[in-house]
Image: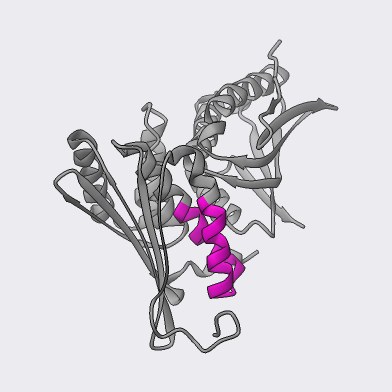
């Protein structure tokens, strides 16, 4: 794979953005980062799924941001024959929201499969005012592995995938 | 009678037509957080019309839908849940028509078909 007609990228290739107000700009950032993936991955299916993941993670960050600022870093790095992709978002959040996210991630990691977790969230969403489907969508639809950490009032969510772990059936008939 | 008032925000649109006993919903544009309130009002009206007119299916055309976030997607989860809760004889199917070129649609619609087994048909064109 080459990037922009140059040599393969063995060093990390990344984009990092901070923006505010968040909610209005999420779709703008999604389209920008979709272009980044298009250029770097040359794979329309994976670029679309990654752009969806970026959107969900950013909306999550903007929804819980206490200061209106959302941050994102998207990085790609070749590891052997594969390309490792990382999407990190971070924002300041209220303690109650951090606790809710921690509980959500505990449930995710306790679920037998990402799709089981996602279907649980769908069932739950029919009985609740809160959606909470975004995190489930990223792990089940885009096949990304997710991690959560909180340090004081700062929340960081990271989603990772390698090309070989993306869902094989995404482009099947 | 249920009024299926169309949505046109400039960046997102939704409309529904009843034609020859069938309901066809068309979605277009970018369904992000700003579309959630409108869609949350629109979909119940389509469901009410479907129940009122006893259709066997509602077609949801997503060919011109650039993107849908999870909060908008949730409205379809709720819609399918309402259909599941109908007496069996009154249930109808959602028939999604997606775009082959919009690759995010395939796993999203597949997930909906797992949520409401037997109530979702999916076709990709384009």
Identify which residue, B52 or B45, lies in the foreground. B45
| Magenta-span inclusion, residue A36 | yes
Q: Which image quarter is the N terminus of chain A in?
A: bottom right
Residue at 37% from the left image edge and 43% from the top image edge: A60
| Magenta-span inclusion, residue B63 | no
Position of residue A7 in the picture relative to residue B121 (left or right): left
Colour option used: one colour
Residue at 64% from the left image edge and 31% from the top image edge: B92
Position of residue A77 in the picture relative to residue B49 (left or right): left
x and y percent of residue B89 in the render? 62, 26
Residue at 26% from the left image edge and 45% from the top image edge: A104
Residue at 53% from the left image edge and 66% from the top image edge: A36
Seen in the picture, residue A168 relative to A99 is either above or below; the reply is below
**Can residue A96 be seen in this snapshot?**
yes
**Can residue A46 be seen in this snapshot?**
no
Q: Residue furthest top?
A: B1
Q: Residue furthest left?
A: A152
Tell me the quarter of the picture where residue A66 sits: top left
Seen in the picture, residue A154 relative to B4 is either above or below; the reply is below
Tell me the quarter of the picture where residue A98 sits: top left
Q: Main secondary structure of the magenta part?
A: helix
Range of magenta residues: A29-54
Seen in the picture, residue A171 relative to B75 is either above or below; the reply is below
């Amino acid at each position: 794979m080459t990037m922009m007609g140059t040599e393969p990228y063995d060093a990390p290739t990344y984009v990092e953005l901070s923006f505010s107000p968040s909610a209005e700009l999420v779709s703008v950032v999604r389209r920008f980062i979709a272009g980044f993936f298009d250029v770097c991955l040359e794979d329309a299916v994976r670029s679309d799924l990654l752009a969806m993941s970026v959107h969900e993670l950013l909306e999550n960050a903007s929804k819980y941001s206490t200061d209106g600022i959302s941050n994102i870093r998207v990085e790609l790095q070749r590891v052997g024959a594969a390309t490792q992709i990382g999407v990190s978002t971070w924002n300041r959040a209220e303690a109650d929201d951090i606790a809710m996210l921690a509980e959500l991630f505990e449930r995710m990691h306790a679920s037998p499969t990402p799709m089981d977790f996602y279907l649980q969230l769908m069932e739950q969403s029919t009985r609740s005012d809160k959606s909470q489907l975004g995190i489930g969508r990223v792990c089940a639809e885009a096949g990304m592995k997710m991690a959560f950490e909180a340090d004081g009032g700062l929340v960081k969510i990271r989603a990772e995938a390698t090309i070989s772990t993306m869902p094989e059936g995404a482009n099947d008939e | 009678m249920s009024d299926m008032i169309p949505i046109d925000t400039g960046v997102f649109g939704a409309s529904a037509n009843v034609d020859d006993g069938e309901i066809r919903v068309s979605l277009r544009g970018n369904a992000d957080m700003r579309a959630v309130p409108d869609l949350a009002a629109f979909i119940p009206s389509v469901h009410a019309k479907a129940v009122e007119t006893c259709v066997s299916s509602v077609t949801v055309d997503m060919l011109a839908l650039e993107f849908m976030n999870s909060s908008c997607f949730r409205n379809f989860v709720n819609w399918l849940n309402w259909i599941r809760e109908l007496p069996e004889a009154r249930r109808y199917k959602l028939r999604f028509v997606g775009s082959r070129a919009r690759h995010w649609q395939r796993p999203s619609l597949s997930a909906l078909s797992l949520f409401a087994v037997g109530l979702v048909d999916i076709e990709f064109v384009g």
